[in-house]
């Protein structure tokens, strides 16, 4: 196997490359290209990038209702009077919210679990925002809960656990139609397929 290795002329440059290469999908060669690009540009460009990253890490909040990322205590989706608060779409993380929103075909609200049940990884129900979901359903008299989880073993395990917890509540449970390939993450599904799978969702117990 070939590994790209080169000794850089500056320890500061090498340090910056190491930090960029920590990003998903970014190797040292790509990281070096990013760093050299910043080095060639005006200092303000690097300063603005650094400031925006710092602001993101220190100022972004998670919505008190759905746990989506937000600039305020409650996100813009939850406060939107045009959204149907009686329908909650349950997703793994904020990337799935973005993927579904990009379809333009959903007008309900969301609940971000913050992960999936995965005993192999030491993630159990108590590590996710499941109790908060049950509280929302009860307090808001929710009509429908949509499972928009990945078709992986972890996604299926989480959906099954949630369905058992929701059995005692007066709420219908649906899931995405199988237009989303088994094993795929929602963020990698094209918008048309995802939108149709959402619109053509089916009752969970019919799977």
Image: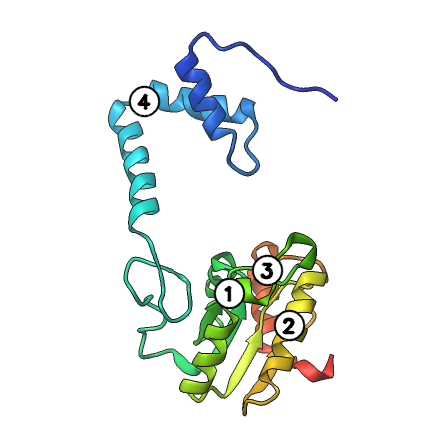
- First-in-chain label (1 vs 3): 1
Within the image, what quadrant is residue 61 found in?
Answer: bottom left
Which of marks 2 and 3 precedes in the sequence? 2
Which of the numbered marks, if any, corresponds to residue 173? none
Question: Disc 4 on helix, strand or loop?
Answer: loop
Distance Cα–Cα, label 4 vs label 1: 36 Å
Distance between the alpha carbons at the discs numbered 1 and 3: 8 Å
Residue bearing mark 1: 100
The quadrant of the rendering that contains the C terminus is bottom right
Q: Secondary structure at mark 1?
A: helix
First reached walking from the N terminus: tag 2 or tag 1 = 1
Residue 138 in which image quadrant: bottom left
Between discs 4 and 2, the one toward the N terminus? 4
Which residue is located at x 67 percent, y 81 percent?
A: 204
As drawn, the label of residue 159 is: 2
Q: Is residue 53 above or below residue 152?
A: above
Confirm or deny contact between disc 4 and disc 2 (CB under 8 A).
Answer: no
Q: Position of residue 11 (x, y in %)?
A: 43, 12
Looking at the image, is 167 positioned above or below residue 45?
below
Q: Secondary structure at mark 3?
A: helix
Please give the name of the residue rendered at 48% of the width and 63% of the height, measured from the top-left corner.
97
Foreground of the two, 199 or 8: 8
State the residue position of label 3: 186
Q: Nearer the viewer, mark 2 or mark 1?
A: 2
- For the residues labelled 4 and 2, the Cα–Cα distance comes to 48 Å
Quarter of the figure with the N terminus: top right
Local crowd at mark 1 within 10 Å, few (<14), some, or many (≥20)?
Answer: many
Tell which circle, 4 or 1, labels the residue nearer the N-terminal end. Answer: 4
Is mark 4 in CB contact (under 8 Å) with mark 3?
no
Q: Nearer the viewer, residue 159 or 83?
A: 159
Residue under numbered circle 4: 41
């Amino acid at each position: 196997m070939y590994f790209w290795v080169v000794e850089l002329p500056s320890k500061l440059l090498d340090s910056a490359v190491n930090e960029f290469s920590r990003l998903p999908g970014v190797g040292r060669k790509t990281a070096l290209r990013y760093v050299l690009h910043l080095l060639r540009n005006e200092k303000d460009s690097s300063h603005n990038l650094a400031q925006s990253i710092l602001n993101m890490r220190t100022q972004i909040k998670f919505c008190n209702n759905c746990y989506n990322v937000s600039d305020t205590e409650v996100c813009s989706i939850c406060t939107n009077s045009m959204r149907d608060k009686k329908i909650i779409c349950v997703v793994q993380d904020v990337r799935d919210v973005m993927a579904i929103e990009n379809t333009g075909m959903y007008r309900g609200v969301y609940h971000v679990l913050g992960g999936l049940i995965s005993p192999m990884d030491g993630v159990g129900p108590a590590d996710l925002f499941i109790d908060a979901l049950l509280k929302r359903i009860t307090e808001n008299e929710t009509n429908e809960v949509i499972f928009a989880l990945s078709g992986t073993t972890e996604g299926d395990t989480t959906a099954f656990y949630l369905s058992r917890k929701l059995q005692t509540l007066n709420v219908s449970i649906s899931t995405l139609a199988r237009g989303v390939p088994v094993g795929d993450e929602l963020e990698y599904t094209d918008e048309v397929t995802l939108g149709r799978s959402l619109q053509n969702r089916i009752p969970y117990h019919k799977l």
